[in-house]
Amino acid sequence: MHIAMVAGEYPPLWGGLGSAAYNLCKFLTEMGHEISLITRKMNKKTVRPKIKNVEIFEVKWLYAPMFFTRSYGKNALKEIVKINSEKNIDVIHLHCPLISLNEKEIIHLKKNIAPVLTSLHGSWLGERDGILAAQKHNESAVWRNPNDLAILLTAKYFSKFERAAARASDICVANSVSTKNDFIERYLLGKTWDCEVIHWGVDEKLFSPLDHDSLDDQTRFKKIRRRYNAADNNALSGKYTTNTPLLLAVGRLAARKGFRFLLKSMPTVLRKFPQAKLVIIGRGKMHKILNKQAKKLGISDSVTIESGMDFRDLADCYKSADLVIYPSFYEGQGLIPLEAMASGTPVVTVNDGPLPEMVDKTVGSLYNVGDYNHLGLKILEELDNPENRKLKAKNGRKRILTMGTFTHKKTAESFNRLYEKILN
């Protein structure tokens, strides 16, 4: 099968959408498919990872927040027509919302090229509401981030392209039940709307629990614990009864990810565990703001903020932490909790949106929306129960491996089934 995959984000842009598109391509080609990947053109020095039977086509785009999705969409459409003229395309797979096509354009693709399947990674209106919720909790001034400001000002305008994709595609695939319901409610799509739910998975081999029999694992584990001053004897022995718990938060340093909200919960934690350490890992422009807030709260010595790191080092941080905290105000799905669970680390996240679809009391804890005191209490609840946390670590890994939902291979198999469905 020849699949035209249209993804506005693709490695070396390793965001959630880029990672999902890359791994989907990888596993689809292992099933024997050929993929033409149409993405945004980057500078000449960019080196993209190569996958056998995946050919990458780069198209121009307007370098402007939000509006790039429309220019990229128009140029991607032209590229699809060109590719099809050289070799027939069997299925077109669009990844929204980073591409904007109107209903007429999608119908043109369906009639003249191939059936259209659209992945919904979340909605612009949902992103806007997440930013507003973050702003309500004093996360960051919106004007500091041009992308957030653009979403606030233009989300309603660009939502019409999401509505078009939802209505005109042969089939839509939401990345969570929450995203599917969000589209149904916002765009009045009705019960007959053809939309399935396929969660994106994670790399269960890269993100794996600490192997106590591996000298390399043990060495890297101890190095991380010492680096962040979370290295009492119990911690270095891999015991859950440590007095120097290591808390980890991962994600882009943007307002809606809720890191300032997380910092507000830390005084509660530190009163009971004064030697606890919080490490925040993410790319973005909020380092100064977060450090300033930590200082204001008097917790600077307990907080470290890291820029992004390569996947191997990040995987080591996951498996070395005692707890992963994910305080996001909005997600279409959210992969960080899954990466933590695959690594054998319990998760504390918000009881809202898609997060409860992945995390429950058997693998972590859920806190009430907008209540940082409750978040602090949930963190303490986990730290106070080391044996229970040990069981949750095992349950999280088991959930990734046995539910048949949360690995890249299972995700690709599910999409392959839908490709065959719309062709037949």
Image (tube, rainbow, N blue to C red):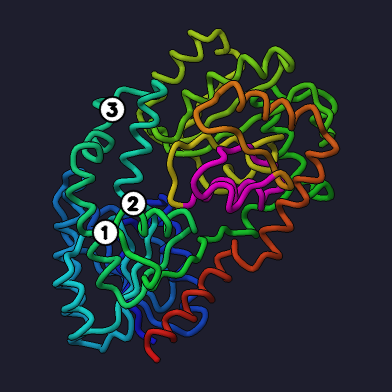
Label 2 to label 1: alpha-carbon separation: 7 Å
Label 1 and label 3: CA atoms lie apart by: 24 Å
Residue 219 x/y as whole percent: 74, 39
Above or below: residue 396 compared with residue 404: above
Q: Give the magenta part as a residue range.
A: 333-360
Q: Which of the two discs, 3 and 2, labels the residue nearer the N terminus?
A: 2
Q: Secondary structure at mark 1?
A: helix
* Tag of residue 162: 1
Q: Is residue 161 above or below residue 145?
A: below
Task: Name the residue rendered at 67%, 29% in the picture.
Answer: 378
The label nearer to you, 3 versus 2, is: 2
Q: Residues within 10 Å of mark 2 (few under 14, many from 20)?
A: many
- Total marks placed: 3
Q: Residue at x 28, y 36 (%)?
A: 148
Which residue has dot 2 on it?
123
Name the amino acid, label 3.
Val
Sequence-wise, the earlier of marks 1 and 3 is: 3
Does label 2 or label 1 sit earlier along the sequence?
2
Quadrant location, the N terminus? bottom left
* Vertical side of 250 occupied by 312: above or below: below
Residue 337 part of the magenta segment: yes
Instruction: Give the residue displayed 36% in from the left and 55% down from the top.
Output: 185
User: Where residue 147 sits in the image (x, y, percent)?
Assistant: 26, 38
Disc 3 designates what residue? 142
Asked whether disc 2 touches disc 1, contact meaning CB atoms under 8 Å apart, the reply is yes
Which secondary structure, mark 3? helix
**Left-right relation of 346 to 71:** right
